[in-house]
């Protein structure tokens, strides 16, 4: 998409309802609405969950990487004109795998491909990379309400 302008946090807040501390997308680098998205989350040392996960050994919870995939996918689907102002919700998570520990200072590179989408129900495949290495991947089902 040659005319695509990157989306920053304020742009993202106009698309999905998530807010800090649970907004897990900092920037959208590329998007093809309803098809695919590439986004970024910068993992800051001051993230709320590091206080307890784990003291002296901060590790980003894997479920939050799955949530980052879901939020990125939601942006891609909610950018379709017919879905503007709607809500994307998890309907299922399959084949989730965690391959690399994510720590403060890491940059999550999130890619999501919408593999099926009909009548407000869809499927997606997402991958989170850190420094080019796979940290997490999963498949998910979602519903638009």
Image (cartoon, rainbow, N blue to C red):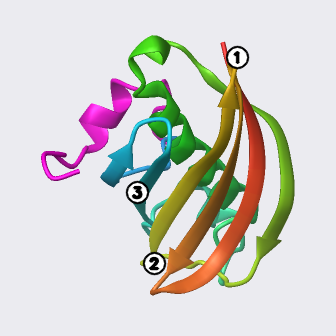
Residue 108 locus on image (x, y percent): 48, 69
| Residue where numbered disc 3 is placed | 39
Asked if disc 2 and disc 3 are in contact, CB closer than 8 Å, the reply is no
Out of 24 and 138, give the one closest to the viewer.
138
Pointer 1 local density, CA inside 10 Å: few below 14, some 14–19, many at least 20: few
Q: Residue 45 sits in which quadrant?
A: bottom left
**Comparing marks 2 and 3, which lies closer to the viewer?**
3
Out of 36 and 7, give the one closest to the viewer.
36
Pointer 3 local density, CA inside 10 Å: few below 14, some 14–19, many at least 20: many
Magenta stretch prevailing secondary structure: loop
Give the structural element (helix, strand or loop) at label 2: loop
* Residue 114 counted in the magenta span: no
- The residues tagged by marks 1 and 3 sit, at their Cα atoms, a distance apart of 26 Å
Residue 35 locus on image (x, y percent): 50, 44
**Comparing marks 1 and 3, which lies closer to the viewer?**
1
Asked if disc 2 and disc 1 are in contact, CB closer than 8 Å, the reply is no
Give the structural element (helix, strand or loop) at label 3: strand
Q: Is residue 142 left or right of residue 48?
A: right
Q: Residue at x 25, y 45 (%)?
A: 8
- The residues tagged by marks 2 and 3 sit, at their Cα atoms, a distance apart of 14 Å
Residue 15 locus on image (x, y percent): 39, 26
- Which of pointers 2 and 3 lies earlier in the amino acid sequence? 3
- Which of pointers 2 and 1 lies earlier in the amino acid sequence? 2
Residue 73 locus on image (x, y percent): 55, 43
| Residue where numbered disc 2 is placed | 106
* Residue 15 counted in the magenta span: yes
- Which of pointers 1 and 3 lies earlier in the amino acid sequence? 3
Label placed on residue 19: none
For the record, the magenta segment spans 1-21
Image vertical order of residue 114 relative to residue 94, above or below? above
Asked if disc 1 and disc 3 are in contact, CB closer than 8 Å, the reply is no
Label placed on residue 119: 1
């Amino acid at each position: 998409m040659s005319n695509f302008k990157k989306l920053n946090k304020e742009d993202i807040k106009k698309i999905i309802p998530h807010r800090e501390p649970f907004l897990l997308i900092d920037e959208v680098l590329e998007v093809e609405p309803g098809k695919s998205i590439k986004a970024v989350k910068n993992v800051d040392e001051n993230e709320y969950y590091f206080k307890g996960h784990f003291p002296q050994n901060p590790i980003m919870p894997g479920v939050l990487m799955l949530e980052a995939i879901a939020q990125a996918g939601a942006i891609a689907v909610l950018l379709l004109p017919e879905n503007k102002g709607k809500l994307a919700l998890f309907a299922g998570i399959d084949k989730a795998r965690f391959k690399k520990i994510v720590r403060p200072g890491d940059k999550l590179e999130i890619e999501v491909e919408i593999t099926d989408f009909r009548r407000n129900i869809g499927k997606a495949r997402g991958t989170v990379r850190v420094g080019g290495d796979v940290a997490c991947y999963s498949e998910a089902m979602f519903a638009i309400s």
